[in-house]
Image: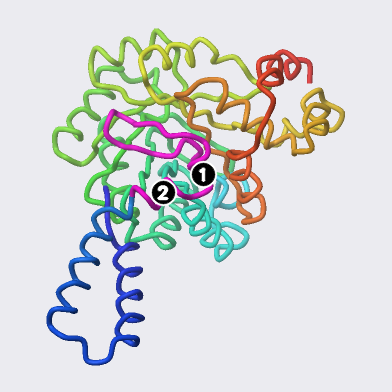
């Protein structure tokens, strides 16, 4: 959902400043100022996102109508160890989210199972009312019995309850992108996807995405529901989903790589990737993100972190200049990393 809370606060502050400068403004002046404020409110969102650091990553339209900067933020790591419970420093997690938006990240990916519930709650605490143009994607399809434990659950009643819970925690009337976290082999795929289709018809979700699927599974799903995005594990050192990336590019579906930095493996000391990054005088993580942005225009990297400094380092990758000859060969180098 798109909200204008952030812009309204900024306009209010600007009007107050102008009020101090202009003593006893005339009616005509007040009308002019109000008109300017309305114009700012209606046009600032696009200019705002496009002028910030993350915009250097390029843009993509999810579902043809949700325009985002390609470099997003994955909110799994703003939870506790084992993706369970509260983060070590909740205040820092809130600072990370707010700084992400300051830097122009307007695509945040989360899930009801992160915490569980914790990630969604912190996102709302940090960012609601949401600025216009911020897209939040969430997922459902897992039960969480404990830290680092994940049990697939695609029963229709579970998916419906998960959607209602996400709406409540995120303080939304409609979820922009609702993703099936896994296709549960114990439940007919038609039942799982049919449930999402019903939720879409009810206006509770706008677009539907999939996670950890093959090309065949995507094609089958698309005979049941419109699919706008696919989220598979993928990075410069983990290329198993190459065929899915190519399919998404042909079909103009957003491809959201989870573990885009391979949980830090891209920074392994002595690796070919580290050697290439040193030559370019950037970090291995920055080079890995730059490669993902180069790999396909539909790739939407979502590196996650629980620290502001690491977030800023990741976003800086969007503006880095890397020789075009380096990137095509990087995947081959990284395979042996």
- Which image quadrant is residue 199 in? top left
| SS of the residue under disc 2 | helix
Task: Name the colour scheme.
Answer: rainbow
Q: Please give the name of the residue rendered at 41% of the width and 51% of the height, measured from the top-left corner.
A: 120
Q: Nearer the viewer, residue 16 or 54?
A: 16
Q: Look at the image and give the residue range highlighted in magenta.
A: 46-74
- Residue 220 lies in quadrant: top left
Residue at the outermost right position: 270
Q: Which residue is mark 1?
A: 54
Near-viewer residue (322 or 136): 322
In this rendering, would 79 be left or right of 154? Answer: right
Whether residue 101 is situated above or below residue 209 in the rendered picture: below
Magenta segment: does it hold 50? Answer: yes
Are the residues flagged by discs 2 and 1 in contact, CB closer than 8 Å? yes
**Quadrant of image for the C terminus:** top right
Q: How many marks?
A: 2
Q: Secondary structure at mark 1?
A: helix
Q: In the image, is 327 to the left or to the right of 13?
A: right
- Expressed as whole percent of the image width and height from the top left, the position of residue 47 reads 37, 50
- Crowding at mark 2 (Cα within 10 Å: few <14, some 14-19, many 20+): many
- The image position of residue 173, as x and y in percent, is 22, 50
Establish if 172 lies above or below 29: above
Q: Nearer the viewer, residue 150 or 218?
A: 218
Residue shown at the point (51%, 34%) measured from the top left = 150
The residue at which mark 2 appears reads as 49
* Mark 1 surroundings within 10 Å by alpha-carbon count, few (fewer than 14), some (14 through 19), many (20 or more): many
Residue 281 horizontal/vertical position (percent): 79, 37
Q: CA distance from mark 2 to mark 1?
A: 8 Å
In the image, residue 144 above or below residue 311: above
Q: Is residue 329 magenta?
A: no
């Amino acid at each position: 959902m798109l909200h204008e809370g952030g812009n309204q606060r900024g306009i209010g502050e600007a009007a107050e400043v102008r009020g101090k400068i202009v003593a006893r403004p005339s009616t005509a002046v007040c009308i002019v100022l109000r008109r300017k404020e309305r114009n700012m409110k209606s046009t600032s969102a696009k200019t705002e996102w496009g002028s910030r650091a993350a915009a250097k990553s390029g843009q993509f339209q999810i579902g043809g109508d949700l325009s985002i900067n390609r470099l997003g933020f994955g909110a799994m790591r703003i939870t506790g160890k084992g993706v369970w419970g509260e983060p070590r420093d909740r205040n820092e997690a809130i600072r990370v989210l707010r700084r992400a938006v300051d830097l122009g990240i307007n695509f945040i990916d989360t899930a009801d199972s992160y915490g569980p519930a914790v990630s969604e709650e912190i996102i709302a605490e940090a960012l609601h009312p949401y600025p216009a143009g911020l897209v939040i994607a969430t997922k459902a399809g897992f039960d969480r019995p404990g830290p680092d434990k994940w049990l697939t659950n695609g029963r229709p009643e579970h998916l419906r309850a998960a959607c209602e819970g996400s709406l409540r925690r995120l303080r939304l009337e409609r979820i922009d992108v609702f993703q099936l976290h896994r296709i549960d082999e114990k439940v007919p795929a038609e039942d799982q996807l049919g449930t999402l289709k019903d939720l879409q018809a009810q206006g509770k979700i706008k677009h539907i995405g999939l996670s950890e699927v093959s090309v065949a599974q995507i094609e089958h799903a698309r005979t049941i529901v419109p699919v706008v995005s696919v989220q598979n594990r993928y990075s410069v050192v983990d290329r198993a989903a190459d065929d899915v990336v190519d399919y998404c590019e042909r079909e103009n579906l957003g491809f959201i790589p989870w573990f885009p930095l391979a949980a830090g493996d891209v920074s392994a000391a002595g690796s070919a990737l580290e050697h290439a990054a040193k030559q370019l005088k950037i970090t291995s993580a920055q080079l890995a993100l730059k490669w993902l942005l180069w790999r396909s225009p539909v790739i939407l990297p979502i590196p996650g972190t629980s620290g502001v400094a690491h977030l800023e380092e990741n976003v800086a990758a969007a503006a880095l200049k890397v020789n075009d000859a380096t990137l095509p060969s990087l995947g081959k180098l990284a395979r042996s990393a």
